[in-house]
Amino acid sequence: MFWNLMLCFAGFCRVRTNAKSTIRTIYHLDLYQEDDTITLQICGNGFLYNMVRMIVGALLLVGRGSYPPKQIKEFLAAKGGQVVKVTAPPQGLMLMGIKYE
């Protein structure tokens, strides 16, 4: 699925970021499962410190029933800094590529 989604990701960012803005554009986010492996691919114009790991952590909690799905919208609405308290571990996280315009 391809789309352009420009949002404030302050809720998905560690407080110690040096970023001037927490607005990022996500071009696509794909989640799929093959046997026991779940893969999440995110393509965007930039990422904040721990942003991807916090997105994964929040989605895992939704998938496990600890958060209702609407909680993700509330995290995205937060403007005051980190609200997601779960960061997925780095194991399995892989940078697939970088594209410059």
Image: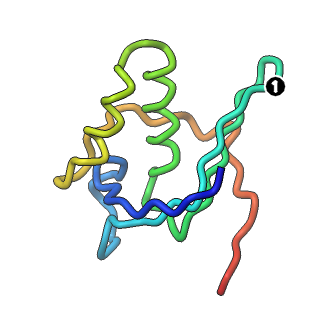
Going by the numbered disc 1, the residue's amino acid type is Glu
Q: Secondary structure at mark 1?
A: strand
The image position of residue 97, as x and y in percent, is: 74, 65
Residue 69 position by quadrant: top left
- Residue 45 vs residue 99: left or right? left
Q: Residue at x 47, y 41 (%)?
A: 55
Q: How is the model colour-coded?
A: rainbow
Quadrant assignment for the C terminus = bottom right
For the view shown, which residue lies furthest in the top direction? 65
Relative to 63, residue 87 above or below: below
Of residues 31 and 52, the one drawn nearer to the viewer in this rendering: 31
Relative to 3, residue 55 above or below: above
Residue 17 position by quadrant: bottom left
- Residue 43 vs residue 82: left or right? right
The image position of residue 18, as x and y in percent, is: 33, 70
- Residue 53 vs residue 15: left or right? right
Q: Residue at x 71, y 28 (%)?
A: 38
For the view shown, which residue lies furthest in the left direction? 80
- Residue 93 vs residue 24: left or right? right
For the view shown, which residue lies furthest in the bottom direction? 101
Which residue lies under the disc numbered 1? Answer: 34
Dot 1 alpha-carbon crowd within 10 angstroms: few under 14, some 14 to 19, many 20 or more: few
Q: Residue at x 31, y 47 (%)?
A: 76
The image position of residue 47, as x and y in percent, is: 49, 62
The image position of residue 2, as x and y in percent, is: 63, 56
